[in-house]
Amino acid sequence: MSVALSLLVAFGIGYLAELAGWLRPRAAWAAALVGGIPLAVGGLPAALVVIFFVAAGTAASRLNPRSRDRAGRTAFQVLANGLPAAVGLALGSPAFFLGAYAAALADTLATEVGSRSSWAWHPLRGRVESGTNAAVSGIGTLALVLGAFWMAPWAFVLGIPAGPVVLGGVAGAVWDSLLGLLEDRYRWWGNDLTNLLATGLGGFVAWAVSRLTG
């Protein structure tokens, strides 16, 4: 499928996601990028990975009454979670693509599930209320690992080893939590920047491990 047609198809799906409440208004253009590039480069299997991530993340948010994303993701959230993966696939690395999405899904589940914990642990402040930025909890950590493993079956679909993808997912999500400390320190450092760097690291770790073990 041509790039232009892939972008158009992805934009249409993104617009339907807006209507369904999965995305915030005017976020379809971002969905066109993060979905259209994988569709053009990796075909239907890669596009299904994107749809799976969006569906899983949306379900996790909808099932969490305390979630800040129950009304859907903004355009910049879409880019932060999906653009590094799309670029990695365009550069020829399915491992980077899946590692980045594994990190994004691991972080999403850790946030949505972890906020239900009775308390969490903050690296600088100790015991805090669950949902506090950069804090971790037992069930949140379990959800993080589970989220990374949820991308493993897609590795077999794309014909690559699953181990590097899972490692990338865990590494990226852990890095996301550590970067959260900078959000508290610097006003200009937002969660979208944290997610962008974390998914990028997840993709890089998956790519590097796959190269070392391949």
Image: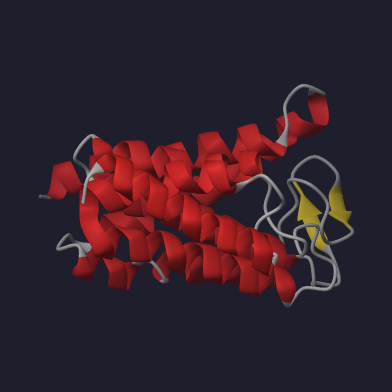
Front in this rendered view, residue 133 or 85: 85
Residue 79 falls in image quadrant: top right
66, above or below 11, in the image: below
Question: Is residue 161 toward the left or the right of residue 89 in the image?
Answer: left
Residue 140 appears in the figure? no
Farthest-out residue, right: 129
Q: Position of residue 200 (x, y in %)?
A: 44, 37
Q: Position of residue 76 (x, y in %)?
A: 63, 38
- Residue at 50% across / 67% down in the picture? 147
Question: Is residue 186 toward the left or the right of residue 112 in the image?
Answer: right
- Residue at 59% across / 41% down in the picture? 195
159, above or below 28, in the image: below
Q: How many marks?
A: 0
- Residue at 73% across / 73% down in the picture? 62
Farthest-out residue, bottom: 63
- Residue at 26% across / 65% down in the picture? 45
Residue 5 appears in the figure? yes
Front in this rendered view, residue 63 or 24: 24
Q: Position of residue 78 (x, y in %)?
A: 57, 46
